[in-house]
Structure formats: structure tokens, C-alpha cells
Image (tube, rainbow, N blue to C red):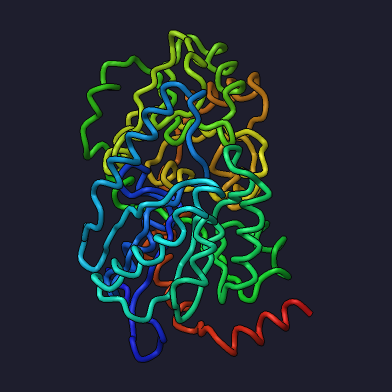
Amino acid sequence: MAVEHDAERTAFDGIICIGGEDWWYHNRGHFDFQIMRRLARSMPVLFVNSLAVRMPSLLEKGQFAARIGRKLKSLSRGLVRVETNFWVMSPWAVPGPTGQRLSGWALAPQIKRAAAVAGIRRPLLWVHCPAGAPLIDKISHTALVLQRTDRFEAFPEADPQVVGRQIARLKSAADLVVYCNASLMDEERREVCRQVLITHGADLDMFTRAGDAAVSEPDDVGALKHPRVGFIGGIDAHTFSPELFLETARRLPDAEFVLVGGCSLPDGWCRLPNVTMVGRKPYDDVARYMAAMDVLIMPWNDSSWIKACNPIKLKEYLAVGRPVVTTDFPALAPYRDLVRIAATPEKFAAAITAALAQPFDAAMARNRIAHESWDAKATQLLDVLRGIRGGENSDQCRATSAA
């Protein structure tokens, strides 16, 4: 599917995206990766890998070396055209407020040079990472879009006051703010000029094929006994509840629990014999890991981050066609009848047991998300982007919204 683009109807000839992740080591299922790759089918896109919000601490032990190593490897790649019209760059920048003051003078010139190589002369500036806020004054752009698909100020490793100021600046300057969560969008409706709700999509064909056993199981889980209970995603304190997960796994000693994804929790947080952690996997392999499970889980905590989220993995889980057990969160509303919801370890374990005992209607789940592909999301978004203009019209819009 090609996203159509009428250059005469838009003021921009390409997009500079200040991303929230790093293309080279984050899961490529993220919103900005998926949307930008599709918009690049019709216009040049420069994806700028995430600007770090803080310097890693030596107290993080093994994680410190891993994070520094990943960042240096990403930086060493420079500017790369990874797909037609889609360029990725890792700029040299020092994280944190002090570092940003020291390296900020060099950041915009790096990005502008890369945009020129990509053939972008009149960019639409798209900002996901709040640390990109200073760039709105340093990179000339036809319009500004803020991607508000994560509540970054709730990220535990960031300074909420610094990030909060950056987000406030972006919201006040943006010609359009893109949300994936209806509750957060409604909460901020008086703070922005224009809003649009674009919920997360999924690579439906890839996950459906995997769920229908058209692909082989990964080697590192193939030997595990059944039943298998899997979580696929980042194992991080601001989203994942280790207490709920551990107590649930203890109650089901005959089940194999599999964690697939990067982990930022302290070393040794889980030593249960029925838990296997296989680490971060390439995006193209994720569907195979989901399909190798008998039940898929989302043991979220009750953080403000989760309340403002729209988990991509929910639609991926449903496309694979395995039963889902999850804690509750607002974005779950359209899918409550397709999943089992539990809040305590006792109820979570009971829900897993019930899911294993009852056949799951994969066809009904897939039918519910049949129109939730990333292609459909990109088309919906492009229709909105065609209508935005920076300058006087947006100034009038902001004046009206502030009144």
C-alpha cells in the first residue's frame, strides 16, 4: 500500500522526525517508526534517533555499560538511508539539561545537513522526544507536529519539571498534536491548537501468519514445556509490575513464563525456576515469540504512564490469536470482551488458568482489529497533515484555544 501525497496541497516537501526511540536498538513496532516508514513511501523522511533525557548512572552497574555501548554504536552509524526515502541519523548530543546547553549549538546544524542530503528543503518538523523542544527555534519549518503518544513527564528516569516545561513549550507552539489515548487528548484539549486521535496500529498480516503456525518456533523457547505464558515488551518499572508478575508465576509452578524484551529492572529481580528471560529480539521475530505462547499477558502497574498509553502489543496479541490476560487501563475499553482482566496475583493466576481451559475465538479478535493496520493509520494521519499550515492561521488558532 502506498500513501499518496499531493505536493501542491501541502507546504512541506518532507518530514524531520525527532524520534522517541533509537532505530538501531529499540523495537520497531513503535508509532513513530511505523508511521514515518509509511509516509516515506511518498516523501523524504529524516528520522533523528531519540535525544537522551539523562546521562546513565554508574549505579546502574551492567545497564550503564550496555546503554553507553548501544549509544556509541548508534552514533558510529551516522546518517543512513535504510529504506527508499527513509533516512536515519544519530546526532552527537550530550543528555541532560547541562549537556544540552553544551551541545545544543551543534545539534541543529547536524540535523539540517542531514535533511539537505535527504532532499528536504521545506520540512514539517515532527517532535516526539521532548528534548527536541529547543529545535523549534533553530530549524526552519513549515509546520510543527507534536507526537503525544507517551506521557514522558511520568518517565521515572527523567526530571519531571524539565520534561514538563519542554512538553508545555511544544504544546503551545504545535500546529497539530497527535494523540493515541483519548483520555489524555481530552485532558489537554484546552492546551493545544489542533488535536487528532490516531490509535496504535499493528502489522496485522505478519502477526496473523505467525499465529496460524505458518512460521517455526524460535529455538530458545521451542524446548520449553507447555503451557507457556508470555509477555513481550519492555520490562520497565514505569509500566511492568514485577510484584504482580512474580506472585502470579509462583501460583502457577507448572506453567512456563517467558519474558521477551529488554529489562531495566535491578539484576536478580526474578529467580523463579519457571521463568525464562530471552532478552530483546528483532521486531521481525516478535510475532513468532507471541505465537509460541499459549497465553499472552500484560501485567501493567497503575502508573500515570499506563493510564495515558495505548499499548501496541494489545492489537499484536489479538492478531496472533492467543488468549490475553491483562490488568485494567483506559485504552482497553473497546476490547474488554476479548480479554480477561485481573488486578491481583490470585485473580491474575486464576484468569490464566481459565484462559488455558477455554478455546479462544481468534477470528472474532482479528475481525475487531481488521481496520487497525499501520497502513490505515498512516492514511488517516496524512489526510490531517495535508490540512495544517504554520504561521498566521496557527497563531489565530492558538489565540482561540487559549481564550
Query: What residue do we see at 27% from left, 62% from top?
Result: 87
> From the viewer's perspective, is 31 left or right of 206?
right
Residue 304 lies in quadrant: top right
Quarter containing the N terminus: bottom left
- The total number of labels drawn is 0
State the residue in front, 172 or 325. Answer: 172
Query: What residue do we see at 55% from left, 48% from top?
Result: 98
Res. 211 in view: no
Check the image and name the residue furthest to the front.
102
State the residue in front, 288 or 118. Answer: 118
State the residue in front, 184 or 107. Answer: 107
Q: Position of residue 84 (x, y in %)?
A: 20, 66
Res. 249 in view: yes
Whether residue 93 is situated above or below residue 191 in the rendered picture: above
Query: What residue do we see at 49% from left, 39% from top?
Result: 55
> From the viewer's perspective, is 258 left or right of 101?
left
Q: Position of residue 221 (x, y in %)?
A: 30, 22
Q: Position of residue 224 (x, y in %)?
A: 32, 16
Quarter containing the C terminus: bottom right
Residue 91 lies in quadrant: bottom left
Residue 317 lies in quadrant: top left
Whether residue 55 is situated above or below residue 365 in the rendered picture: above
Q: Position of residue 190 (x, y in %)?
A: 73, 70
Whether residue 325 is situated above or below residue 221 in the rendered picture: below
